[in-house]
Amino acid sequence: MSESDRDTSTAAADVETSPQARGVAETAGPGAPASPGAMEYDYTNFYFGAGSDAFALLEPFDDWWREVKPAGYYLYELPLHTAPGTRVDVEDTKTGQVRRGLVNFASYNYLGLSYRPEVKQAIKEAVDVYGGGSSGSPILSGTTALHQQFAEAIADFKGTESAMVFPTGYSANVGTIAGLMRSGDLIVADQYAHASIVDGMILSKAKSKFFRHNRADDLDRKLSGFDGKKLVIIEGVYSMDGDTPPLAELIEVCRRHGARLMIDEAHSAFVFGETGKGVAEHQGVDHEMDIHLGTFSKSLGGQGGYIAGSTQLINYLRGFSRSRFFSCALSPVVVAGLMKALELARNEPELRAKLWENVAYMNRLLADAGIPTGDSTSQVIPIMVRDDARIFQIGEEIFREGVFINPVKYPAVGKHKSRFRMSISAAHSKEELEEGAAKIVKVLRRYDVCP
Amino acid sequence: MSVVGSYRFHTGVSAFFDMATSDARALLPEHLEPIEVTHQRSVLSVTAFLFDDSVVGPYTELMFSVIVPPTVAKWGQHAKAGFYPFLAATTSEEARRIKAERFHFPYHPESIDAQFIERHDHVRIRVFGADEPILDLSITPGAWETTTHLLQGFMMNGDQRLRTTLQISGDYTVHENEAGQMTLFPHPITSNLLTQEVSPYPFREHWFKNGTEVFHHLETI
């Protein structure tokens, strides 16, 4: 279907036009298809380029971007006009319309905590006491009593001696890895490790290797023959595939080689395990992890990151995590909301039960429709399309049908591995899951992604 | 840019393997940098083309390259990637002589033998030298489409730095399903790769069919 063939008036979602969106649409040139070769290029083709001018890539990138943005890249960074609830109002920057009441499968709000009245009330009360920001580095003036209480609450929740809070999950990984490892050491990470893990490895200047995804035998090979400090890094739930690691096998390899093991539970903390500690608890190896890392932006619906472990580890990293102490501390307002969200997550196990019920129901809906979902065993469900050339076209039609879900293609995932990443929340109603799945299936059938 | 050589091919494969950046850098002249696919890991490209129509008739070419950044050009002329071939081999001495003169590809002096065994779900390329195995490479398909790739090749002629632009057109599939595999056997062609930590599994598999490779004039850079 060409851009001019598309009739947005048939879209199921209610729409209205915003002046801001109109401006963007005019710039983007609605209806202008990209040239045939343009969509065969991607960000990676403009990352490297030999030449003598540091700005040499800007112009060809800009020319390419203006062609491809209306053809699909505009689907990223669409402004929301509502909280990240189960239904959202989203600005369509291509048509200049605000699409209302879309079923939301894009947000990380796995327990629906970001907009709970108790959380909002805690935030309002903190504003009155602390104002908007922390106004300082955590090691200088940015640590409030709230920050300390929250770090202690995280350690208590994770069952570790200590914990430390970072301004983002990204900085937690970068600061922990680069704070601990040095030139001459060895870091081995799963090949699907998040960019913040990779960036931490780069900053550490340690020798870096990647083992094949979830393959303990390859980890064994990558650790063999190295005599020195070794750190292995894995994730609890891999964010693009929704699968989990075989922890017992990986732990055995790490112990045999004398390697320390760090697990990033960004997508699994607060939802996996009997008490919600994460995948390590779920697999019964919680105390075998040397470093627990996680974020507050997913299940707790806020912002920030943490590490939890021994007091010695935290004390050391307090002095060497540059990404933490060279950043402003989290706003106390955010921390207040997180404190309440953590309390709710701990005291309401029914939220996790509802989440897993929803995940099972959505998996059943997708399986019944014959939609491939890879190896997901979590609330992150990849809808595998494997059609890099048409993923944006399909994404645009799903969006116009009334579902907010992000297309993912190379380089975020491998070539020929394009997909939609579906995030399920405990807050989704059965009706919302059914409506969203039906709309997605309707579009995917048109493209022969499912029978 | 004028065309200096056009080669029709029946099958062309290119498999990308990650290799240590330190090893990649050692293979490159000092004016070129390897592209890193992940931290400290660069890209080794192993290509094999079965040309079915050239001035010397049908022949096979095997080429080992390091992937490097292309020189920036205006959008529309901006190449998708660059490569520096550090070793090539052919089944035809005449083809080798002509391409060495035109493009200064660094050819192994002895001819090789090659088999392309093509099935619907994979293509296997077996390369031999004097009946001894050199390489066994299997590539699998993803979704097929018709495409044209604009690439840049970088070569050296003594101290002279050279660059050519080439277009590869044809039926094409690419994926990163890690379904292919490569085995290298001891041989002068593979000797400097066998000492390196090269993954036996290509992270990206390209497969062209029924296409054309068009080379443009060499430029001194």
Image (cartoon, helix red, strand yellow):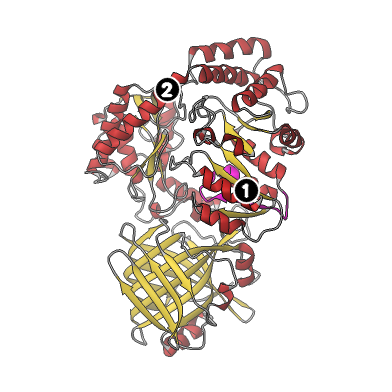
Q: Chain letter for mark 1, please.
A: A
Q: Is residue A195 magenta?
A: yes
Which one is nearer the viewer's eye here, B219 or B67? Answer: B67
Q: Provide the residue designation for mark 2.
A: A85
What quarter of the picture does the C terminus of chain A occupy?
Answer: top left
| In the image: residue B112, left or right of residue A316 | left
Q: Is residue B46 visible?
A: yes
Q: What stretch of residues is rendered in magenta? A: A182-197
| In the image: residue B110, left or right of residue A150 | left
Residue B206 is situated, as x and y percent measured from the top left of the image, at: 40, 64
Residue at position x 56%, y 73% from top? B194
The relative height of residue A3 versus residue B170 in the rendered view (above or below) is above
Q: Is residue A98 visible?
A: no
Residue A354, picture quadrant: top left
Q: Is residue B50 magenta?
A: no
Residue A4 is situated, as x and y percent measured from the top left of the image, at: 27, 41
Callout 1: 10 Å neighbours few (<14), some, many (20+)? few
Residue A362, picture quadrant: top left
Q: Provide the residue designation for mark 1.
A: A255
Q: Earlier in the sequence, mark 1 or mark 2?
A: 2
Which of the two discs, 1 and 2, sits closer to the camera? Answer: 1
Residue at position x 58%, y 61% from top? A50
Q: Amino acid at mark 2?
A: Gly
What quarter of the picture does the N terminus of chain A occupy?
Answer: top left
Callout 2: 10 Å neighbours few (<14), some, many (20+)? many
Which one is nearer the viewer's eye here, B13 or A94? Answer: B13
- Secondary structure of the residue carrying tag 1 is helix
Q: Amino acid at mark 1?
A: Arg
